[in-house]
Amino acid sequence: MLDLGLLLTLYPPPKRGAMNTPAPAIRISGLQKSYKDLHVLKGVDLDVARGSIFALLGSNGAGKTTVVRILSTLLKADQGTAVVNGFDVVAEPDKVRESISLTGQFAAVDPILTGRENLVMIAKLRQVKGPKEVADGLLERFGLAEAGGRRVATYSGGMRRRLDIAMSLIGEPPVVFLDEPTTGLDPEARIEVWGIVQNLADNGTTVLLTTQYLDEAEKLADRIAILHQGVIIVNGTLAELRELLPSATVEYVERQPSLEEIFLAIVGDKTPANGENTKSGKEER
Amino acid sequence: MSAHTVSNTGVMLGRSMRHITRSMDTIITVTITPIAMMLLFVYVFGGAIQAGTDNYVNYLLPGILLIAIASGIAYTAYRLYGDLQSGIFERFHSMPIARSAVLWGHVLTSLVSNLISVVVIVLVGLLMGFRTSAGPLAWLAVAGILVLFTLALTWLAVIAGLTASSPDGASAFSYPLIFLPFISSAFVPTDTMPAPVEWFAQHQPVTSIVNTIRALFAEQPVGNDIWVALAWLVGILIVAYVCAMAVYHRKIA
């Protein structure tokens, strides 16, 4: 039996970024931010390990987006520090911007341009070599090759979000912020996005994900933190979070398929990412 | 200015120029509406207007150009507002690019598109009987004044685009600007107006700008008008730029 943990200690995945330090990809300490009378962040502390998927959970207005905006140098904190990829967001914002990319809550794509033009634009801005080839490669990888020549205004929500994430990957930033990446998507598109995120982390990218969907955090995240009333009230792995509650009791409940499973079984050939195959019966004859 | 900034600004300029060429609405408002107005004033009202000139197209053209620019810059505010709303403004600002390129892309787009519509309107004017014997230097002076006018109004548009709370609000600020030429020497001589209106017309920027351009085209001495016009234009440009940058820095960390 291969011990994956041991294997990773022996052969750690290649790390990109500042000087191969074992320091976390993101380190936030004592972060505070107020908007006028509203004290949104009251001292947030958290570390995100390199190459991990970290989910920041919280209800609407909890301040998740505020944290992401501070980390991506769009907003200045009132107090506290934030370090991304070894660079302080206030002291070295340019280095931080080189290290990150942001996929916002509302797909920040240009609807008047085509999908390809959006990608070429970002590649040119990041001064990546061969912007056209980079764009074509990403269109292919994200299943947008056919739609690449159409204006984004004609895309579905899922296509827009895939394009949005594709735009974020240009220049291969070591840290990616995904601010509610599946809000407003249909179940199939959500599962697609989950696959993309998982893929990113598998390739060594650090992902900070904010979400209000608990199942999303459960499926994707290596660590989960809950932001509530301006502070992190819980921070740990899913197993650690489970231990916070009294141990499980065994109950017998008739298992009905969830509406999501039914929907996916009827409309497509994709199965939910948790591996429960609801249409295996169809294959037998 | 580094090569990086120039390259980034070029990409931004290309992007918003595409926005213009792909929206018929913009092209119609910015170019066709002033041309229609010129046709209306020359062939419908022109016969009844006593402007004391034998070529009313010559008299009218400078004012029409200013109206075209004033309506054109409204779209700059509108596009900037759209960028802020869609989130693409934040995407750009979270990227390793020269941040100034984001605003300058819009400003240069405004300059290029307005100059294109000015050229088209002048060409139509020539077809309608606009004549000038102005030399290269006078043309250059006219071009310089129009560029200054466009830049000054564009930076006003940037303030509107950054502070608006609705798309209508973003472009509404331009209505008074479009209206200003009507209460100036652009269509009729100001001395035919009632005293208070005449006083206003004489002391607002459009009159001095129109008089300067008209004199340059007619190869007449520009007199004091050119200095009054330049003072207005440079003054508005500096104040608008400073305010726009202050608003911008409040908006973005």
Image: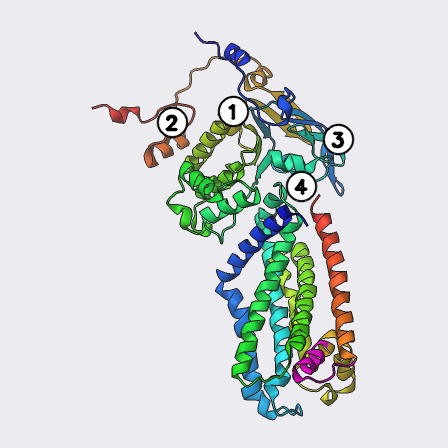
Mark 1 vs 3, N-terminal side: 3
Colour basis: rainbow
Q: Residues within 10 Å of mark 3 (few under 14, many from 20)?
A: some
Q: Secondary structure at mark 1?
A: helix
Measured in 3D between alpha carbons, the distance from the residue under mark 1 to the one under mark 2, in whole angstroms, is: 19 Å
Say which label, 2 or 3, has the lower sequence index.
3
Quick check: B233 above or below B54?
Answer: above
- x then y, percent, for residue B122: 57, 77
Residue range (magenta): B209-223
On the image, which quarter does residue A102 sit in?
Answer: top right
Q: Earlier in the sequence, mark 2 or mark 4?
A: 4
Label at residue A74: 4
Q: Are marks 4 and 1 on the same chain?
A: yes
Counting other residues with Cα less than 10 Å from the Cα at mark 2, is it few (<14), some (14-19), or many (20 or more)? few
Q: Are marks 2 and 4 on the same chain?
A: yes
Q: Earlier in the sequence, mark 1 or mark 2?
A: 1
The residue wearing badge 3 is A80
Q: Amino acid at mark 3?
A: Gly
Q: Which of marks 1 and 4 precedes in the sequence?
A: 4
Residue type highlighted by circle 2: Pro
